[in-house]
Image (cartoon, grey):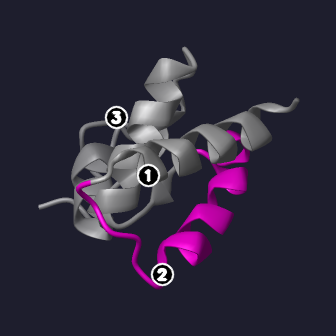
Amino acid sequence: MCAASKLVFSSFHSLIGNLGDKLQDSDLGDLSHVHAIPYVDYFTFDRRIAAYTTMASKSLGMKQHEKLFPNIKSLIADFCKMPDPCGRRWPQCP
C-alpha cells in the first residue's frame, strides 16, 4: 500500500476512533486531500483534521506531519525562519 493510502486510512481511523468528536460535513472532503500530502512540500488544513493527520503520520512513523499547517499565517511564519537561497529576506516576512 502506498504512503498516501496508508496516511488517509490511518487519518480516517484516528478521526472515527475519537468518540467524543462528531463527524462534520466537511470531514470527508478534507480527508480526500490527505492523498496529496506525501507529494507536496507544504499543506494547510483546518486544525482539527491536521491534528488527526498528525496523529496518523506519527503512528505510522512518517514525517508527513512536518508539512502540515493549520492556516496560511502559520505556514508563512515557518517559511520566514528559512534562509533565502540568495541571502535576502523573504518579502512576506515581517
Q: Which mark is residue 26?
A: 2
C-alpha separation, residue under disc 1 versus residue under disc 2: 13 Å
Q: Is residue 86 visible?
A: no
* Secondary structure type for disc 3: loop
Of residues 83 and 81, the one nearer the viewer is 81
**Residue 55 is drawn in which quadrant?**
top left
Pointer 3: residues within 10 angstroms few (<14), some, or many (20+)?
few
27, above or below 13, in the image? below
Nearest-to-viewer mark from 1 and 2: 1
Residue bearing the label numbered 1: 15
Q: Amino acid at mark 2?
A: Ser
**Residue at the image point whose x is 30% and y is 60% from the top:** 48
C-alpha separation, residue under disc 1 versus residue under disc 3: 36 Å
Seen from this angle, which residue lies furthest right?
1
> Which residues make up the magenta segment?
20-41
* Residue 31 counted in the magenta span: yes
Which mark sits nearer the N-terminus, 1 or 3? 1
* Secondary structure type for disc 1: helix
Q: How many marks?
A: 3
